Amino acid sequence: MDEKALQTINIQRIQSLASLVDEYALGSDFILGEVSGKRIEKSEKVLRMLNSPIRFEGYILFFLKKGHFSLDVNLNTYDIHERSLLVVVPGNIIKLSRYDEDRIGDAELLFALMSKEFLSSVRFDFYKVFQETIRMWKNPCITLQEKELDMAEDYFRLCRKILSSNQTNKKEILGSLLTSFTYVTLDLWTRRLAISRDTENHSSARVNQIFEHFIELVTEYHNEQRGMAFYADKLCLTPKYLSKLVKLSSGRSAPDWIDSFVILEAKNLLRYSDKPIKEIVYLLHFPNQSVFYKFFKSHTGYTPSEYRKSPMLDTGLSGRDDRIRTDDLFNVTEAL
């Protein structure tokens, strides 16, 4: 399927909201920003955009100096608090799930947005290093210690100075700084994971690895493939054995995970596009409208038409509030 169902956001889209953030940019490849105080309270467009599930076509790196909110990444809800560092890679589905409207103005957030082309140009395989070494699909966020936060801020301030300078080779300088910071961050993640893995045995680690690969596949193929046989074949397992491992690792059945991703896509299309339902049925590869209506209502309690017409209905990931919330991401074992 050529067309993406989920709303996809890129740096150009973020730049259209540039007046809402304190930003330094390198064309459409790199944005460094700081949001705090009244700027957040007035950022209604940004908050509204993040209240629906989106994909960002690039890399997002941010750390929260002050404040608290919850963010959904790939159907899991993470507690983002002071000194949290989070990295989102291309293909991740993100959504702002919860924040305190009365205190959102107290938050202080530093962030960097990078295009895939920019990271490719620095000749550093950022995605491969993190995906294979620290398994960021499951651990996209860590809490920094005070000294680590100071170091992250030092990198941020230095990048900011480069962007505002008269240097003619800004892209190369920023690429070198990003490579350096990536290695620093990689070391932080590796040490955090080493602590959490001390309590794991080899068997459970293998189960969780298979589950992570399953979620990656579901993220990519759920619009087109909803049968267990497809995913089991990709992982060289039998459908029955894969179902057992997914349930063991996450506490949820494999079909439930697949359905949750499909419902997320359907809600996004119904809420944020003007596509007729007949076209949505086609995009999501349902055989006909009747099957889609029954599927959607069984998972949400509403028909697609009811959901589209009422802006007051929830814009969450599924009709059931069965997402896991965590206060300390690296004290969580393997529940998702």
Image (tube, rainbow, N blue to C red):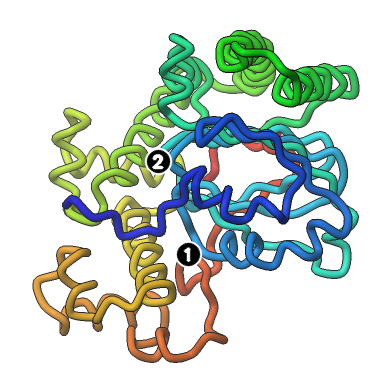
Q: Residue at x 79, y 58 (%)?
A: 40
- Residue at which label 2 appears: 91
**Image vertical order of residue 243 relative to residue 183, above or below:** below
| Residue 212 shows in this picture | yes
Q: Secondary structure at mark 1?
A: loop
Pointer 1 local density, CA inside 10 Å: few below 14, some 14–19, many at least 20: many
**Residue 225: where, in percent of width, then height?**
17, 52
Give 222 or 112, whichever is nearer the viewer: 112
Which quarter of the figure has residue 334? top right
Q: Which mark is residue 15?
A: none
Nearer to me, 275 or 205: 275
Question: How many numbered circles does the render carry?
Answer: 2
Q: Which mark is residue 317?
A: 1
Horizontal side of 200 relative to 166 (left or right) equals left
Q: CA distance from mark 1 to mark 2?
A: 17 Å
Q: Earlier in the sequence, mark 1 or mark 2?
A: 2
- Would you say 201 lies left or right of 208 here? right
Quarter of the view holding residue 282: bottom left
Look at the numbered disc 2 and give the secondary structure of its residue: loop
Relative to 174, 314 lies left or right: left
Task: Please name the residue shown 49% across and 46% down the image.
Answer: 12
- Report if the CB atoms under discs 1 and 2 are less than 8 Å apart: no
Location of residue 145 in the rendering, given as x and y in whole percent from the top left corner: 85, 23
In this view, the residue in front, 84 or 119, is 119
| Three-letter amino acid code at the position of disc 1 | Leu
Under mark 2, the amino acid is: Gly
